Amino acid sequence: MKQVFILFVFFFTFTANAQLNPDKNADRNLYCSNKVKSVTMYECNRKTNAPCRNETLISKDSYDTTGLLIDSYFHFGWMHDAYYHQFEYDSFGNVVSDISFYNKEPFMNTFTYTYEGNKPLSKKKNDEAWYYSYDNKGNRITEKWLLNGDNYPNSFFLDSFQFNAKNQAVKMTRYNNDGSCYFYFIYQYDDAGNRISEARFQNNEMTDMWEHYFDGNHHKTGWAHYSSKMEKTAGSYFENVYDQNGLLISSVVNKRYRRYVYEYYQ
């Protein structure tokens, strides 16, 4: 039950910090500058940063020339299941089509946007809709999520964001449709600008906290989840190796060795 609860809270963490593009586009600039075409990850049960013979292909992600993720394959070896996604984007780099395949069964999400300049004011997906507003620095300060679309305007959550002088989000509050507070997050950063903690509160009591660990080059080295009693419930620590361009080439995560192979555009 504890693992199920963590996944449930993670869903709300993700939706509360939703991005318009897939998470893996966080490396867009890195992959674009290095002309990365695809990244394939292999894994084996080995405790050291050294190749091993019995590798399993876990994932393969492909990117366009601007660094946007265009298709993604992921295989759960222990479940014998595979997931495949295909993405299409508009001229602003926002997803307009997400086709997912689970065991060859397709499911498609389509997205439409309205813009002011290059900033989206709304996003619609199937029967859902989101509306955004910004401050004079361009930070998104509200996000209204209509769970059942425009036809049900009273069924929504409203997220409100607060920023510090460095334009870093320091608090996110989710309100119910009656204006009451559902929950809120407090974010903290280190001197290098890395987000190092996310604490979730409900009824003014902390329910969960996530910590994130980084090295001196902004590379993430681990994470941990804590319960309301500050008991550690989950976490991972990484032993990562990067090439001279900053691309991850191998890692050890939870005693499993991972190797990353890159294809490049000419």
Image (cartoon, grey):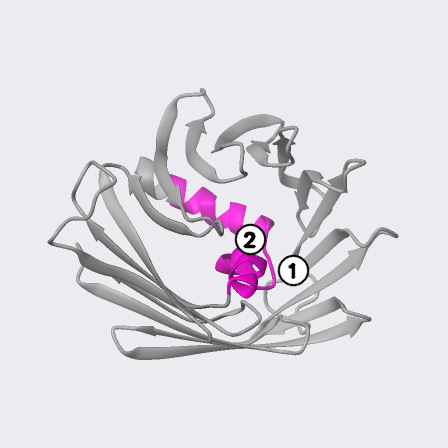
**CA separation in Å, label 2 and label 1:** 10 Å
| Dominant SS in magenta | helix
Instruction: Name the mark on residue 145.
Output: 1
Q: Residue furthest left?
A: 54
Q: Amino acid at mark 1?
A: Trp
Tell me whether circle 2 and circle 1 mark residues in contact (CB < 8 Å): yes
- Answer with mark 2 or mark 1, whichever residue precedes in sequence: 2
Secondary structure found at label 2: helix
Residue drawn at x 16%, y 55% is 55
The answer to whether 154 is drawn above or below residue 9 in the figure is below
Residue 254 vs residue 28, the one in the foreground: 28
Residue 174: quarter of image: top right
Whole-percent x, y for residue 222 in the image: 41, 34
Residue drawn at x 84%, y 51% is 137
Whole-percent x, y for residue 165 in the image: 81, 36
Whole-percent x, y for residue 16 in the image: 59, 49
Q: In this rendering, would 91 be left or right of 238?
A: right
Residue extent of the magenta highlight: 5-34
Q: In this rendering, would 252 be left or right of 193?
A: left
Magenta stretch containing residue 48, yes or no? no
Q: In this rendering, would 208 be left or right of 165?
A: left
Residue drawn at x 51%, y 74% is 64
Would residue 123 be visible to someone looking at this image?
yes
Q: Amino acid at mark 2?
A: Thr
Whole-percent x, y for residue 177 in the image: 69, 52
Residue 107 vs residue 257, the one in the foreground: 257
Would residue 76 be visible to someone looking at this image?
no
Residue designated by label 2: 15
Q: In this rendering, would 159 be left or right of 66?
A: right
